[in-house]
Amino acid sequence: MEELVKPGLKRKLVSYGVSEALACKAMEVLTPEKLTELKGTVVTVVFTGPADPLATIEQVFTDLGLGDVVIDFVAPVMQKKLKALGVDAAVAQKVGESLPSKMEKLRPKLQTLIFESASGDPGDALQSLQDVFKVLEIEGDV
């Protein structure tokens, strides 16, 4: 099972936007004992897809000691998405730096932007992005 789950976990984490280095670390620390302990969470990530991906990734980060989910996952993913949309790099960086203090307030909006924007209504993603800028008090049009 371990031979199947480790590469699957790495692949899924990277597909969500987790860095290659952290995904490799997840594979390294996922011992057979840890896999038994975390079976439900890991199986959900690898095989079925979580209902709440952000909460599940937070759980994986916590359980495997991968670091701070906001600093090491949410902020870099948001910065990358913003830059891909043509947002100035300095503004994208400011968003990333501001997220840790506002994470709980922004959780639903970040969930939409990180996990649902590719398959959901573009208007939802745009509204979520506008809300993030407003909460973070970042000036400018989205």
Image (cartoon, rainbow, N blue to C red):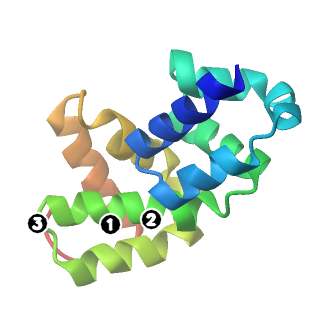
Q: Label 2 sits on what residue type?
A: Ala
State the CA–CA distance, disc 3 to disc 1.
Answer: 11 Å
Q: Is residue 39 shown above or below 123?
A: above
Q: Is residue 36 visible?
A: yes
**The N terminus appears in which quarter of the rendering?**
top right
| Circle 3 residues within 10 Å: few <14, some 14–19, many ≥20 | few
Report which residue position mark 3 lands on. Answer: 86
Residue at the top extreme? 48
| Circle 1 residues within 10 Å: few <14, some 14–19, many ≥20 | many
**The C terminus appears in which quarter of the rendering?**
bottom left
Res 75 label: 2
Which residue appears at 33% of the width and 33% of the height? 116
Which residue appears at 16% of the width and 37% of the height? 123
Res 117 label: none
Taking the image as shown, residue 42 lies to the left or right of residue 116, namely right
Q: Label 1 sits on what residue type?
A: Gln
Q: Residue 62: percent from the left, percent from the top?
A: 74, 50
Taking the image as shown, residue 28 lies to the left or right of residue 78, namely right
Q: What is the secondary structure assignment of the residue under circle 1?
A: helix
Taking the image as shown, residue 60 lies to the left or right of residue 23, namely right
Q: Residue 34: percent from the left, percent from the top?
A: 84, 36
Report which residue position mark 1 lands on. Answer: 79
Q: Is residue 51 visible?
A: no
Q: Is residue 50 shown above or below 7?
A: above
Q: Label 3 sits on what residue type?
A: Gly
